[in-house]
Amino acid sequence: FWVNDDILVFIVDEYKDVVINPKHGYGANLNPCLDCKIFMVEKAQAWAEAHGFDFIITGEVVGQRPKSQRADTLPLVAEKSGA
């Protein structure tokens, strides 16, 4: 994932397991939305903490994505990711 124009965090190997074995199932077209969101937020939170940041911004819009951006799933993302 991108942090800014200068920093790229390589997560491909870890991410493959999330795509192949999503704990919360697939969305449309083999898209493990919820598991991907949890994974990305977990990685961003870990990076932020390691570099002294107090918060992360995800840009979520409730209702934009039917599986991962619902009012009932965003608290699950926060809980499972540790954010």
Image (cartoon, helix red, strand yellow):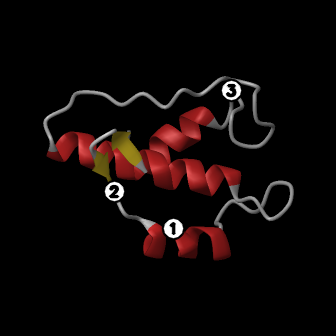
Other residues around mark 1 within 10 Å, as few (<14) / some (14–19) / many (≥20): some
Q: Residue 41, percent across and down?
A: 45, 45
The local secondary structure at tag 2 comes to loop
Estimate the spatial distance between the alpha carbons at disc 3 and disc 2, rounded to whole Å. Answer: 28 Å
Label 3 is placed on what type of residue? Ala
Using the rendered image of the protein, determine whether residue 21 is visible from the camera's viewpoint.
no
Q: Residue 56, percent across and down?
A: 36, 31
Which of the two discs, 1 and 3, labels the residue nearer the N terminus? 1
Q: Residue 18, percent across and down?
A: 57, 68
**Which residue carries the number 1 mark?**
15
The quarter of the displayed image where residue 72 is located:
top right
Label 2 is placed on what type of residue? Val
Label 1 is placed on what type of residue? Tyr
Q: Residue 34, percent across and down?
A: 65, 50
Reply above or below: 69 against 22: above
Q: Disc number at residue 71?
A: 3
Estimate the spatial distance between the alpha carbons at disc 1 and disc 3, rounded to whole Å. Answer: 25 Å
**Which residue carries the number 2 mark?**
9
Reply above or below: 54 against 37: above
Is residue 15 rendered to the left or right of residue 21?
Answer: left
Which of the two discs, 3 and 2, labels the residue nearer the N terminus? 2
Using the rendered image of the protein, determine whether residue 33 is visible from the camera's viewpoint.
yes
Is residue 27 rendered to the left or right of residue 47?
Answer: right
| Residue at the image point whose x is 33% and y is 56% from the top | 9
Is residue 6 rendered to the left or right of residue 72?
Answer: left
| Residue at the image point whose x is 55% and y is 75% from the top | 17
Other residues around mark 3 within 10 Å, as few (<14) / some (14–19) / many (≥20): few
Contact? badges 1 and 2 (CB < 8 Å) = no
The local secondary structure at tag 1 comes to helix
